C-alpha cells in the first residue's frame, strides 16, 4: 500500500460540561484528524493528544510537527506492505506515540476495508458488543455537601443507564470521602478510582484505607515514571493497582508485570503508539494472567471506534471507558455514532473502522489552516 496524501486538521469539539481530573479541567477537546489518501482507498483517522503536556508529553503542536516533519517524509509515496513494516520504519522516531497512532490506525482502516472486513474482524476479535463503564470527573468545588450531591446524582444516573462499572477521578483532598459516600448510598456496585498520578508513596495510608471499600482497582495512583514505587505500593495494599500513564510500550508492560507493579493494565492505543503495540501488550498480559481494558481520552467517534474494535480481543476482560459521542461532545464529527444499550456498545460491522465522518461538521470545527502533506 502507498499513502499518497494526508490532510491534517486541528479540530475543536465542545464538551457539554467541564471534565475535571487531578491534572486540570477540560471544557473543549482539541484533536488532530487525518484524512489519508492511498492507492487502496481513503480513510479518516485520529491523533488524540491534549493541548497541554499533562497526561503525556505530546501536545497538539508536537503532533502536527512530528506528523508533518518526520512521519510524513518517511511514509509518503513509499510501498509499505504490512503494519510490522510501518512500525519498523517509524522506529527511528523516538516516542511520539500519539502522532504515530494517527497514521498507524489509518493503515488498519485501509487494510481492513480492502479485505472487506470490519476492523474488529480484521484484528481477529470475536465479540459483537463490549461492556462499558463510565468515568466521572471531580466536582468543580470539592469539600461541600453540594459536591457530594453532584457526585451521587451522577453515579445514580450512570447506574440507571446501566453502565457496567463506575470510575471516579480522585485527587488529594477528594479520595476516601467520595468512595465512602458512594458505598454508603449504592452498596457494592462495581466501583474504581483513578488518581492520574496525583500521589506519592508517602500517601500509601490513603490507599491502604481504601482496601476496606472493595474497589475493582486503583488506577495510576503514583507518577508515570514510578513503576518501581507502584510495586512497593501494591505489596502494601490488597486492592489491585491498574497502570495507565506508566505503560507506554510492551517493554513497560513487561517490567510492570514482572516486578508486580500492577494486577491490571489500562491500554489506550494512542498512548502506546497504535493498535499493533496494544495487541502486543494484550498478548503479554494474557500470557501472564493480567486482565486489560481500554480507557479513553475523549477521542472523537473515530478513536472510540478503534478502541471498540480492540476491545473485542479476549483479554479485554473489564468494562471499557467508551461511551456514545453525546456523553462527551455537543456535536461529534461522526454521522454514525456508537450506541449504548444495556451497558454495552455494539461493535461496528461495516468494512474498515465502520464509522462515517460528517464532513460538513468536520469543516465547521476545523481550526485553519489545513495542512496538506503529499
Ligand atoms: Mg487513567
Image (spheres, rainbow, N blue to C red):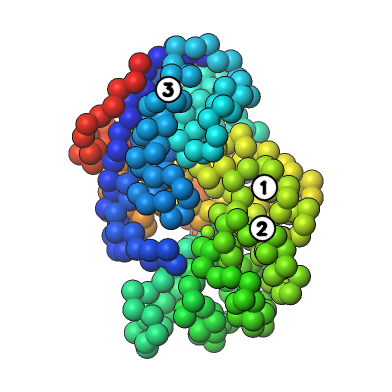
Q: Secondary structure at mark 2?
A: helix
Mark 3 and mark 1: Cα distance apart in space: 27 Å
First in sequence, mark 3 or 1: give its number.
3
Q: Is residue 314 left or right of residue 334?
A: right
Residue 202: give x, y in percent of width and height. 62, 76
Residue 77 visible in image: yes
Mark 3 lies on a secondary structure that is helix
Q: Which mark is residue 177?
A: none
Residue at image coords 33%, 74% = 140
- Residue nearest the observer in this picture, 118 or 100: 100
Whole-percent x, y for residue 300 in the image: 38, 44
- Percent across and percent down for residue 356 are 37, 34
- Residue 79 lies left or right of residue 47; in this view the side is right
Q: Of label 2 and label 3, which has the lower sequence position?
A: 3
Q: Which residue is mark 2?
A: 227
Mark 1 lies on residue: 252
Q: Count every numbered label the image shows and give the total.
A: 3
The residue at the point 24 percent across, 38 percent down is 366
Mark 3 — residue?
72
The residue located at (52%, 19%) in the rendering is 114
Task: Determine whether label 2 and label 1 are within 8 Å by CB.
Answer: yes
Q: Mark 2 and ligand 1: say if the CB distance to the nearest ligand atom is below 8 Å.
A: no
Secondary structure under the numbered disc 1 in the rendered image: helix
**Distance of mark 2 from mark 3, alpha carbons?**
33 Å
Q: Residues within 10 Å of mark 2 (few under 14, many from 20)?
A: many
* Mark 1 crowdedness (10 Å alpha carbons): few <14, some 14-19, many ≥20: some
Amino acid at each position: 500500500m502507498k499513502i499518497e496524501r494526508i490532510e491534517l486538521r486541528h479540530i475543536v469539539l465542545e464538551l457539554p460540561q467541564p471534565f475535571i481530573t487531578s491534572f486540570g479541567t477540560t471544557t473543549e477537546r482539541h484533536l488532530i484528524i487525518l484524512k489519508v489518501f492511498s492507492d487502496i482507498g481513503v480513510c479518516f483517522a485520529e491523533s488524540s493528544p491534549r493541548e497541554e503536556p499533562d497526561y503525556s508529553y505530546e501536545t497538539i503542536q508536537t503532533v502536527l510537527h512530528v506528523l508533518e516533519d518526520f512521519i510524513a517524509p518517511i511514509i509518503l509515496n513509499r510501498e509499505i506492505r504490512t503494519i510490522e513494516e510501518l512500525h519498523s520504519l517509524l522506529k527511528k522516531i523516538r516516542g511520539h506515540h500519539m502522532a504515530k497512532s494517527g497514521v498507524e490506525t489509518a493503515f488498519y482502516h485501509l487494510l481492513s476495508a480492502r479485505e472487506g472486513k470490519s476492523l474488529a474482524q480484521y484484528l481477529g476479535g470475536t465479540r459483537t458488543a463490549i461492556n462499558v463503564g463510565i468515568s466521572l470527573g471531580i466536582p468543580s468545588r470539592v469539600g461541600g455537601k453540594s459536591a457530594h450531591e453532584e457526585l451521587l446524582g451522577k453515579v445514580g444516573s450512570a447506574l440507571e443507564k446501566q453502565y457496567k462499572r463506575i470510575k471516579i477521578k480522585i485527587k488529594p483532598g477528594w479520595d476516601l470521602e467520595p468512595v465512602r459516600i458512594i458505598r454508603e448510598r449504592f452498596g457494592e456496585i462495581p466501583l474504581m478510582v483513578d488518581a492520574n498520578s496525583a500521589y506519592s508513596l508517602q500517601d500509601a495510608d490513603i490507599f491502604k484505607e481504601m482496601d476496606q471499600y472493595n474497589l475493582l482497582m486503583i488506577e495510576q495512583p503514583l507518577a508515570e515514571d514510578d513503576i518501581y514505587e507502584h510495586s512497593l505500593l501494591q505489596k502494601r495494599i490488597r486492592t489491585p493497582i491498574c497502570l495507565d500513564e506508566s505503560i507506554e510500550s510492551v517493554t513497560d508492560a513487561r517490567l510492570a508485570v514482572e516486578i508486580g507493579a500492577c494486577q491490571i493494565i489500562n491500554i489506550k492505543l494512542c498512548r502506546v503508539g497504535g493498535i499493533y503495540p496494544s495487541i502486543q501488550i494484550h498478548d503479554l498480559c494474557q500470557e501472564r494472567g493480567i486482565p486489560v481494558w481500554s480507557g479513553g481520552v475523549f477521542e472523537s467517534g473515530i478513536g472510540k471506534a478503534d478502541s471498540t474494535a480492540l476491545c473485542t480481543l479476549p483479554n479485554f476482560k473489564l468494562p471499557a471507558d467508551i461511551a456514545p459521542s453525546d456523553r462527551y461532545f455537543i456535536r461529534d464529527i461522526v454521522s454514525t455514532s456508537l450506541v449504548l444499550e444495556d451497558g454495552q456498545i455494539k461493535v461496528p460491522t461495516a468494512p474498515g473502522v465502520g464509522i462515517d465522518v460528517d464532513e460538513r461538521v468536520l469543516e465547521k470545527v476545523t481550526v485553519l489552516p489545513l495542512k496538506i502533506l503529499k
